[in-house]
Image: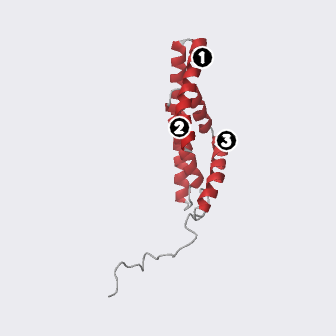
Amino acid sequence: MLAVLILLLVSVPLVELYVIVQVAGGLGVGQTILLLLAVSVVGAWMVRRSGLGVLNQIRTRLERGELPGNELVDGVLILVAGALMLTPGFLTDAVGLVLLFPPTRIAVRSVLVRRYSKRITAAGWTGGPGAPGGHRRSGPTLDADSFSNETDD
């Protein structure tokens, strides 16, 4: 996993630089810079709009007494999209925009939930985003009302 992260940290800026140079060769430097700024402004607006929408969904679920698991995953994906939109480059902006559109975000969310729910269950936790529970499967349960830290001597 660390090797993949290092590879991404090295290769993504190089690929972004290559794409920017290619676009600048076709459009011109000034228009390329304006295009990068325009995409960033539109992306920031979309991140704000999507983030506020997910925040309202979380608030609604909490008011109904439900766990907002899927909404929290959406919030993380929107946060990642915002970070990608802040990174200068066309490829990171494209990935960020894809994460901002609800249909593709739902698809990514379902893949992530399916993948990491298995890991969470294997680690001894039940539930996951959108599932009831979220507690350990084994071990004693402590009642906080009757628990005392004092020892009888």
Quarter of the image with the C terminus is bottom left
Residue at 64 percent across and 57 percent down: it is: 118
Residue at 56 percent across and 17 percent down: it is: 21
Identify the amino acid type marked 1. Gln
Mark in front: 1 vs 3: 1
Name the residue tied to disc 1.
Answer: 22
Name the residue tied to disc 2.
Answer: 6
Marks 2 and 3, how far apart in space? 30 Å
Q: Which of the two residues, 130 or 89, is positioned nearer the viewer here? A: 89
- Residue 153 left/right relative to 32: left
Marks 1 and 3, how far apart in space? 30 Å
Identify the amino acid type marked 2. Ile
Q: Where is residue 60 in the image (x, y as percent from the top left)?
A: 54, 54
Tell which residue pokes out farthest to the front in this image.
3
Question: Total number of numbered labels?
Answer: 3
Contact? badges 2 and 3 (CB < 8 Å): no
Contact? badges 1 and 3 (CB < 8 Å): no
Task: Quadrant for residue 66, please give it.
Answer: bottom right
Q: Where is residue 3 in the image (x, y as percent from the top left)?
A: 55, 41
Name the residue tied to disc 3.
Answer: 103
* Mark found first going from the N terminus, 2 or 1: 2
Tell which residue pokes out farthest to the left in this image.
153
